[in-house]
Image (tube, rainbow, N blue to C red):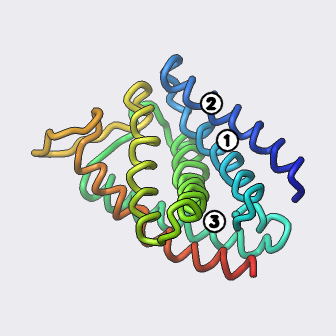
Amino acid sequence: MNKKVSISLMIIGLVIMSYGLFAAISLHSTIWYSFFLIGGVLFLGAMNIFIGNNSVLKLIEKNKKRLFLIYIYYIVWTILIEIIGRFWLNLWYYPSFDSINQLIHVFIIGYPFAFFFIYESFLILEKIVKKFWLAVILTTIINAFLHEIPNTFAWEWVYTIPNVTFEILKINIVVIIAWVVLIIVPLIVNHKIIVKANK
């Protein structure tokens, strides 16, 4: 992928990502997150290619089978997280989604593209700070607020955290901690998979 294509994808991704944020903040759309994620993956992935990093977008050309396997891995994580967090612990729900919308915006797009988004942002931060674990920490903190704050305008998902009321920028502290757990294992595993695929 040459730099002109990368720049074009960055622009397209930024437009779609920005629309997602606009849809959340101004339109209170309950499907804002899908636009935000798809645009974000394009924008961050193209940026990574432009600056010479690895990117999941490279797998589209180099190893579609590995990309598909990573996507399936993300779906498995999605199912586990939903079973434990939503159905067992009852920590969140989707007030506006029927079964079809949950399938599309939670299982097919939501979590899998969130993981792709997180990984692309991690690659950029790792190049800046030059330290793996510092990049992991920064990626966790930045993504927690970047993904959760717009949802306080749209409420695509609603948390039902018991007994804990402490919040930072309207985000419950339990949610922020949960993002740490959510990110670290998939990030490390897929970092190794994608780096291996691009060697």
Task: Tell me which amino acid carries mark 3.
Answer: Tyr
Task: Tell me which amino acid carries mark 2.
Answer: Ser
Task: Tell me which amino acid carries mark 1.
Answer: Gly
Q: Position of residue 73 (x, y in %)?
A: 57, 71
In the picture, measured across the screen, residue 23 lies left or right of residue 46, that is left
Dots 2, 1 in contact, CB < 8 A: yes
Q: Which residue is mark 3?
A: 71
Q: Quadrant of the C terminus?
A: bottom right
In the picture, measured across the screen, residue 179 lies left or right of residue 55, that is left
Distance from label 3 to label 1 (Cα)?
Answer: 17 Å
Q: Which dot marks residue 18?
A: 2
Distance from label 2 to label 1 (Cα)?
Answer: 8 Å
**Residue closer to the observer: 130 or 74:** 130
Q: Residue at x 78, y 65 (%)?
A: 58
Mark 2 and mark 1 lie on one chain; the one further toward the N terminus is 2
Circle 1 residues within 10 Å: few <14, some 14–19, many ≥20? many
Q: Residue at x 40, y 57 (%)?
A: 82
- Secondary structure at numbered mark 2: helix
Most extreme residue toward the front, as rendered?
Answer: 129
In the picture, measured across the screen, residue 106 lies left or right of residue 83, that is right
